[in-house]
Amino acid sequence: MIALVLLLATAGLGVQLQAQEGLEAVDALASAGRTEEARATLESWWEDDRPTAGRRDRQRALWLRAVLTVDPSMAGLDYQRLVLGYPGGPYSDDALTRLGFISAADGNLVKAANFFRTLVRDYPRSPERRGARAWLSENEAAVEEAEEALRTPAPPPVETTLSEALARYAVQLGAFLSEELAERLMVLVEDAGFTTRLVRVRESALIHVRTGSYADRAAAVELMRRIRELGYDATIAADVALEAPVG
């Protein structure tokens, strides 16, 4: 029995070492500037080794995929997955920093501030903390102005058509041409505790990521506020009646 336990433990250690070696190769290729080879090696690792990889290697793989991707939107989703799925992990503070600067570059100061505040609050030993506090200090007035604008309720519509009156409101988190990208965002939001769906709507080629369905717009606005506090670009959609599920 003891021999069997030792054999299983040795086998498990061997799998972990193999996974680590694969990621070491990805890191080495990336450091050498051989980006395409690094991506190919990581993709192979993702398919073959990720199912049996340990928690730390899964985090490292997410970080490498985000760093190596050519699509900023997909990189952002992997950074968010690190933050939400592995709070306190070895890459999560760096992910928060990158998410903060990505959001600031996109002009979303409230979202950027939320990422930097989370970094300052939850990662007291992180070397990234100083830069986050500096950004918050330098942009304090602009962030307060942007937050005040979000707190100001939208004026009611001047006129409501029959189709608008029959519509139910939802909160939309994003819209993508890529179903894979939409699914990644859906997983992230569901990991945060919200039930989501992928839909298409009339006269749009995009796949929409949505949550909630309300007759009352105020209820949808409250849900949108909660989701925005997590750092997502949530908006209100008023065409739920026209939704067609994806898949």
Image (cartoon, grey):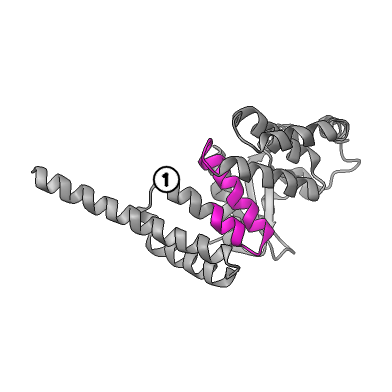
The percent position of residue 184, horizontal first and vertical second, equals 56, 54
124 and 31: which is toward the camera: 31
Residue at point 71%, 61% (across, down): 202
Give x and y (percent) for residue 100: 72, 43
Inspect this view and state whether residue 153 appears: no
Q: Residue at x 59, y 54 (%)?
A: 198
Q: Determine the residue positioned at 89% across, 43% down.
A: 159
Q: Position of residue 77 (x, y in %)?
A: 61, 51
Secondary structure mostly seen in magenta is helix
Image check: 41 left or right of 215? left
Region rendered in magenta: 63-90
Secondary structure of residue under mark 1 = helix
Q: What residue is drawn where x is 71% and y is 34%?
A: 130
Q: Is residue 225 above or below residue 80?
A: above
Disc 1 marks which residue? 55
Q: Residue furthest front?
A: 32
